[in-house]
Amino acid sequence: MDNPVLKFADVPLDRAEERRGDPEWIAGRLVRDDTRYIPVWRDLSLIDDGHGAILPTAVICEGQAGGVSTVGADVLTASCETVFLGMEGDRAVFAVDLSGSDEEEAVAAAGGRGKFQDLWRAGSSIDARGAALMAYARGMLYWHRENRYCGRCGHATESREGGHRRRCTDTDCGRNAFPRIDPAVITLVEYRPEDGRPPMCLLGNHHRPPPNVFSTLSGYTEPGESLEETVAREVFEEVGVHVSAAYYQASQPWPFPSSLMLGFRARAETTAIVVNPDELLAARWFTAEEVRGFGEWGDESASCALPRRDSIARFLVDSWVSEVTAL
């Protein structure tokens, strides 16, 4: 099994942090003809399924340098929030929130092609570069909508530093807020018997669709808790299994709405499963040979299916299968 590409990571931009604090530079870049804009409408991303494309593509609006002379002005007029994302060579890239318009108006302002779709569902079929840009734009604009008012005094906040800070407008408060993410662990639990039986991994069948997918276990880190402690707690809470060690594997931005998935592998001390019905429908131990017989995500004919190819859950499963098979 080949390791999948971890979508939504590796944003192909220079984030140009040294430029964010210059409002005149930001304002000038925002209206240049060569600037690019990534539209978002109510947490949905603009994706083009037509125009002869083999695969869906991210719609990125361009000014005159891209041959579309009016789109830049139209998308800025319709935007209720803009965030500077970074530089692509000499070209600035901004996220633009079109949520103040209805969907038809938003599509028209962005050039009239494509439709707004859920990136979580469409991301697996979009090229890695486009998916990373749309995820970054979606995550930043979501944060702005959730932080329009000060968490300390309740006054309105305003965007600063190209959208990478919001400041309370009350002069007696002046509290700064910065973009935040919610760290979550996602874990492949393995058991390696000492009696010669093949290694096994523990996968859970979650409440979310598709109904036949068996995936890794996950949960959010709580205050006062290390990532390793989160792994042990979440595994025990979901399936009643104790783990002795947890090893970091990889991470993936997951802007649905604002998480960072931190991938681990953990060794199980016990194998008896007690499923928490609030968390899972079922959980089972599988050998690598059994996992290789799983269907793909979306294959309703398979009794058991793998996680999506663009997910870190799939990365963890495929990595484990490849390692165990090589033993």
Image: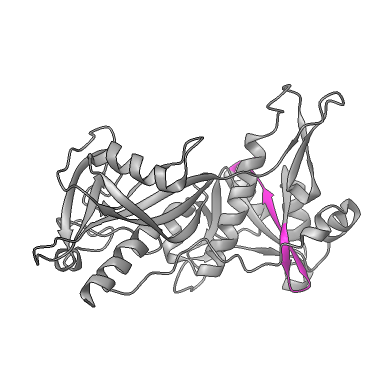
Q: Which residue range is magenta in the image?
A: 85-102
Q: Quadrant of the C terminus?
A: bottom left
Q: Is residue 183 above or below residue 127?
A: above
Image spot of residue 32 (x, y percent) = 83, 63
Choose top left, top right, bottom left or bottom right for residue 151.
top right
Please say whether residue 143 is visible from this viewpoint.
yes
- Main secondary-structure element of the magenta-colored stretch: strand
- Is residue 76 on the magenta stretch? no
Image spot of residue 285 (x, y percent) = 16, 54
Q: Nearer the viewer, residue 137 or 321?
A: 321
Question: Which residue sits furthest right?
Answer: 24
Horizontally, residue 182 falls left or right of residue 278, namely right
Q: Is residue 132 above or below residue 67?
A: above
x 82%, y 60%: residue:
18
Choose top left, top right, bottom left or bottom right for residue 166.
top right
Q: How many marks?
A: 0
Horizontally, residue 246 falls left or right of residue 61, namely left
Horizontally, residue 169 falls left or right of residue 257, namely right
x 22%, y 49%: residue:
269
Q: Quadrant of the N terminus?
A: bottom left
Q: Nearer the viewer, residue 109 or 196?
A: 196
Q: Is residue 223 above or below residue 228?
A: above
Q: Nearer the viewer, residue 157 or 99?
A: 157
Please say whether residue 100 is visible from this viewpoint.
no
Q: Is residue 129 above or below residue 226?
A: below
Horizontally, residue 216 falls left or right of residue 156, namely left
